[in-house]
Image (tube, rainbow, N blue to C red):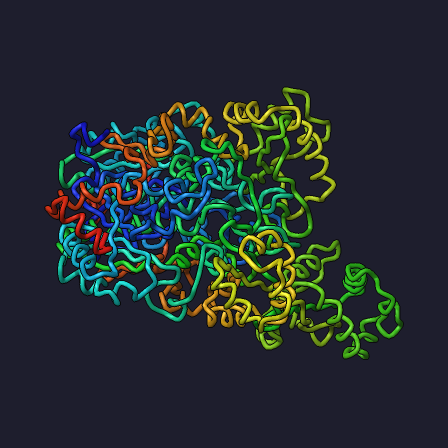
């Protein structure tokens, strides 16, 4: 483990108390990747995010949620019932020794328990507290019920996504808006740390998931007062249809569209034209086409069809792997549409030692799982995944003994009081 | 005024497009000194005319334009996209192909804390701007390179933008409907990765404070973004499952979808002005030459003017079927182009569309015609029985909600399609705003599917958070900028957004005020065409 190498981690002096549910767990995970000591605090019985699938071997069990395992690596796990008097006192003692508190409760919940920022800053003025909510701590929607689907919709990102003849659509599976917001939260936490080093003061950070996602929407309306129609990306406007997804020999899909030279002044189509010509796929029309003049505002559908026909044959004659290798060789802007399994076997990631394999005795003997590794590689200390996600209360004894000096008896007594 | 968060932090920024500039845009908003190094010979993609001034550039980008695209011209200060991604920065225009240019930039690096770049693989090193070169002039420099797939490995030089990288990461494959091609989610990774860059940079600054060491950070945007996919990566290993796109389905909630609603907002209009017979013939053809167009009372301009009221009703009956933007495109792209423009109201038409207005009183049809309302949607997500009961109450407990096929969560999942159909039939009777309000009053998670208009003009929550700000710019003009307050609001550190720089706007300031160069030294650089 990295900590045993006696090497100073990028954020190793700092401790994080993580109270978040699925809305913010990637934030603490990332701070942990940077070396911070992250203590995940769960209510007795376990965090709600443990009930999010998929599950290991599809066994629905709070210790087997793959969502939980994904975003709680590099954390120690304790249980604590902050709704009891004892629990609150213990939490305050932990806060004295912490640099960050991250939480994602409904606005006002912690204030109601006497654990809001106003209470905690009295205990620890240098504390940096991050609150992650759907809409923010204040404002007309702050108490609205929400979810990933609703945050996505209300950010303006959903309306243009999907097909014109169907409802707007979200990204499937894991809640992407929460991941986006959690990543922004980690950036904000690190910015607050910079401020603290300069001034000595902590502060409260109010992060809204809706705003995180809204920031990323294209600014079409802002700049043109037009509403971006759905299915952009498959059609150029309504006048012509351009193909952007191509089927390969082995059923794989490739994303590619011919780019006009006016896009960035670079001959983006040259590599593919060269390759297709070399292999005899280029028709006379294709060869004679004036690529410099390619312009989607004036080209006709017939012209597009005549360019796409040989292209379709070309893609269909090659496997996904051949096309990826060729794209690198000829420096072409096309990319295969990978699945998770493709990502796992991608030679680029393997070559860069991206994956970190962790042992999972909790899931069975000899079980090992590969996790995404460093999100950036540093010449000093790279972010690293060194610890699998904790089981419920796995580090109770360790944390309560070493941080709060409790005895085994104290811990048993608190358990009996339902505090942990 | 209180000291800004990053006052005194100095950044030399070679990055272009989004993933890099988003980092420095954010840090500049909190007081960092950001010098964007660019040049005529190596401009930011967004400087291009394709993304040119306001509407025209963006329309061309969307494929909605009517004017042919112009060749790439890097000398643009008018691009709204550039203006958006580069707020608060200074611009140094310098030719990096000249040794004096490199020398100048190194002087800036010598006083900087952070250098950012996204040159194509190896280019920085060849120019003498690699980490080892820069460490010579500033031993504790923190340098971050952000590129598609990292500085090393067999695919390091595979070119691309974020719009392509989403495919590799696996995000495309899980976006859209199972029976269709993936939905185009755009350059999603470009928006996720910069915040990881900020985390790495802030941590590096803290590390430098503690140890005195600078560092080099090689950020592969691919490797950063795969963290969004971890549950599916584990699912693939643990359960050998290949997860693809499933529309709006989600195992933990039902109903969980977007539902059609009654149109809301202001009426939508397209102004049309037809003058010549050719235009009239072309217009009739676009309408599909309906029988009434053959009526002699519309045969000539004079006849059409005589029967203008009747003509307007007939034209409006046709325009009502379409969205104004779609129609505008069709009319303008016709072989015989027909003057037309989207307007928000008849009042706007009479005030603000001189090109068409000026044709009156000689044109007919001539006016602002009501079009179809945009499609409006709401989203509803019901996670448990308590929410389901509230949901049914909001609907007024119609008999179908009591049917056995919807009696439990599992049963509702099994009949999700029927359920969606019944809900859609109900939501159609209400505006999305009223569905949201009714559901929220009952404690059911629900919202509107916001358009750009909704979030910019109408969303009270984003307004409450000062999400938009208006900035003036000498060449772009006044514009409203989203994300002016990021998703995070610091209780003690306000943010302050300044406009984007013109190309080379700060050359003189940077050379004279920051580097303390004399007039003749600056003139020598100008004469040698180092500053461009």
Residue reaching furthest top?
A279
Q: Position of residue B61 (x, y in %)?
A: 56, 49
The residue at 39%/29% (across/down) is B121
Q: Quadrant of residue B100?
A: top left
Residue A225 visible in the displayed image: yes
Height in image: B438 above or below A71? below
The residue at 41%/45% (across/down) is B18
Height in image: A30 above or below B127? below
Residue B471 visible in the displayed image: no
The residue at 41%/60% (across/down) is B481
Residue reaching furthest left?
A405
User: Which quadrant holds the N terminus of chain A?
Assistant: top left
Q: Position of residue A158 (x, y in %)?
A: 52, 55
Height in image: B259 above or below B506? below
**Which of the pair A208/A109 is nearer the observer?**
A109
Q: Position of residue B374 (x, y in %)?
A: 62, 64
**Which of the pair A229/A385 is nearer the observer?**
A385
User: Is residue B14 toward the left or the right of residue A314 in the image?
Assistant: left
Height in image: B453 above or below A408? below
The residue at 34%/48% (across/down) is A25
**Which of the pair B413/B43 is nearer the observer?**
B413
């Amino acid at each position: 483990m990295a900590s045993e190498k006696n090497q100073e981690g990028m954020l190793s002096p700092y401790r994080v108390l993580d109270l978040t549910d699925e809305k913010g767990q990637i934030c603490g995970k990332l701070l942990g990747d940077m070396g911070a000591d992250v203590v995940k605090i769960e209510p007795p019985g376990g965090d709600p995010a443990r009930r999010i699938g998929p599950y290991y071997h599809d066994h629905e069990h709070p210790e087997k949620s793959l969502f939980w395992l994904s975003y709680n690596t590099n954390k120690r796990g304790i249980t604590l019932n902050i709704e009891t008097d004892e629990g609150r006192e213990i939490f305050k003692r932990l806060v004295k020794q912490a640099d960050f508190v991250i939480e994602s409760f409904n606005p006002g919940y912690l204030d109601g328990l006497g654990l809001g920022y106003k209470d905690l800053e009295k205990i620890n003025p240098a504390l940096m507290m991050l609150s992650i909510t759907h809409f923010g701590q204040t404002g007309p929607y702050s108490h609205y019920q929400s979810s990933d689907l609703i945050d996505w919709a209300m950010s303006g990102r959903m309306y243009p996504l999907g097909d014109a003849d169907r409802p707007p659509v979200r990204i499937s599976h894991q809640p992407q808006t929460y991941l986006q917001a959690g990543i922004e939260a980690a950036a904000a936490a690190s910015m607050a740390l910079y401020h603290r080093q300069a001034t000595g003061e902590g502060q409260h950070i109010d992060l809204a998931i809706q705003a995180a996602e809204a920031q990323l929407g294209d600014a079409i309306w802002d700049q043109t007062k037009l509403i971006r129609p759905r299915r952009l990306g498959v059609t150029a406007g309504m006048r012509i249809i351009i193909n952007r997804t191509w089927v390969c020999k082995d059923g794989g899909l490739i994303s590619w569209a011919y780019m006009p030279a006016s896009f960035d002044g670079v001959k983006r189509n040259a590599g593919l034209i060269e390759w297709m010509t070399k292999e005899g796929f280029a028709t006379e029309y294709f060869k004679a086409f004036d690529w410099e003049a390619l312009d989607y505002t004036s080209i006709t559908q017939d012209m597009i069809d005549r360019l796409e026909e040989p292209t379709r044959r070309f893609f269909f004659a090659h496997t996904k792997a051949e096309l990826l290798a060729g794209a690198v060789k000829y420096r072409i802007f096309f990319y295969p549409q990978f699945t998770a399994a493709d990502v796992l076997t991608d030679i680029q990631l393997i070559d860069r030692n991206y994956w970190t394999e962790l042992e999972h005795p909790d899931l069975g003997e000899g079980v090992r799982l590969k996790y995404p590794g460093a999100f950036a590689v540093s010449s000093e200390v790279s972010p690293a995944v060194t610890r699998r996600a904790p089981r419920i209360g796995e580090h109770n004894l360790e944390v309560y003994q070493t941080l709060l000096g409790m005895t085994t008896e104290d811990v048993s007594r608190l358990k009996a009081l339902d505090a942990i | 005024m209180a000291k800004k968060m990053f006052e005194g932090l100095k950044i030399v920024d070679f990055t272009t497009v989004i993933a890099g500039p988003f980092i420095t845009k954010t840090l500049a908003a909190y007081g960092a000194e950001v010098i964007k190094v660019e040049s005529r010979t190596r401009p930011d993609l967004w400087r291009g005319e394709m993304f040119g001034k306001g509407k025209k550039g963006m329309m061309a980008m969307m494929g909605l334009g009517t004017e042919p695209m112009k060749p790439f011209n890097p000398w643009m200060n008018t691009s709204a996209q550039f203006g958006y991604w580069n707020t608060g920065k200074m611009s140094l225009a310098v030719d990096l192909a000249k040794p004096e240019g490199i020398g100048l930039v190194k002087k800036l690096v010598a006083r900087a804390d952070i250098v950012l770049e996204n040159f194509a693989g190896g280019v920085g090193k060849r120019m003498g701007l690699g980490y080892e070169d820069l460490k010579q002039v500033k031993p504790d420099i923190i340098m971050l390179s952000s590129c598609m797939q990292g500085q090393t490995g067999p695919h390091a030089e595979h070119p691309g933008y974020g719009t392509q990288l989403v495919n590799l990461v696996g995000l495309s494959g899980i976006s859209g409907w199972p029976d269709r091609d993936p939905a185009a989610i755009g350059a999603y990774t470009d928006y996720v990765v910069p915040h990881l860059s900020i985390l790495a940079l802030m941590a590096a600054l803290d590390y430098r404070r503690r140890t005195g060491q600078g560092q080099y950070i090689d950020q592969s945007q691919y490797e950063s973004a795969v963290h969004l996919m971890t549950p599916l990566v584990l699912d693939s290993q643990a359960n050998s499952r290949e997860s693809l796109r499933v529309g709006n389905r989600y195992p933990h909630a039902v109903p969980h979808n977007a539902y059609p609603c009654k149109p809301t907002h202001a009426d939508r209009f397209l102004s049309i002005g037809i003058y010549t017979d050719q235009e009239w013939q072309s217009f009739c053809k676009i309408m599909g030459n309906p029988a009434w167009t053959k009526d002699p009372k519309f045969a000539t301009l004079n006849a059409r003017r005589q029967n203008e009221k009747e003509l307007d009703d007939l034209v409006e009956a046709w325009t009502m079927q379409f969205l104004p933007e779609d129609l505008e495109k069709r009319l303008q792209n016709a072989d015989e182009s027909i003057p037309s423009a989207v307007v928000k109201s008849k009042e706007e038409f009479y005030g603000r569309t001189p090109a068409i207005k000026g044709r009156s009183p000689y044109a007919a049809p001539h006016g602002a015609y009501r079009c179809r309302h945009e499609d409006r949607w709401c989203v509803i997500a019901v996670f448990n029985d308590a929410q389901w009961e509230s949901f049914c109450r909001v609907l007024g407990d119609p008999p179908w909600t009591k049917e056995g096929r919807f009696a439990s969560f599992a049963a509702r999942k099994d009949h999700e399609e029927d359920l969606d159909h019944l809900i859609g039939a109900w939501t159609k009777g209400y505006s999305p705003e009223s569905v949201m309000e009714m559901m929220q009053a009952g404690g059911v998670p629900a919202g509107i599917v916001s358009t750009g208009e909704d979030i910019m003009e109408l969303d009270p929550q984003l307004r409450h958070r000062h999400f938009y700000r208006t900035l003036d710019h000498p060449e772009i003009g006044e514009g409203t900028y989203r994300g002016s307050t990021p998703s995070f609001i610091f209780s003690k550190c306000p943010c302050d957004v300044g406009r984007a720089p013109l190309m080379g706007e700060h050359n003189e300031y940077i050379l004279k005020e920051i580097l303390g160069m004399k007039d003749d030294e600056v003139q020598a650089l100008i004469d040698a065409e180092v500053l461009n």
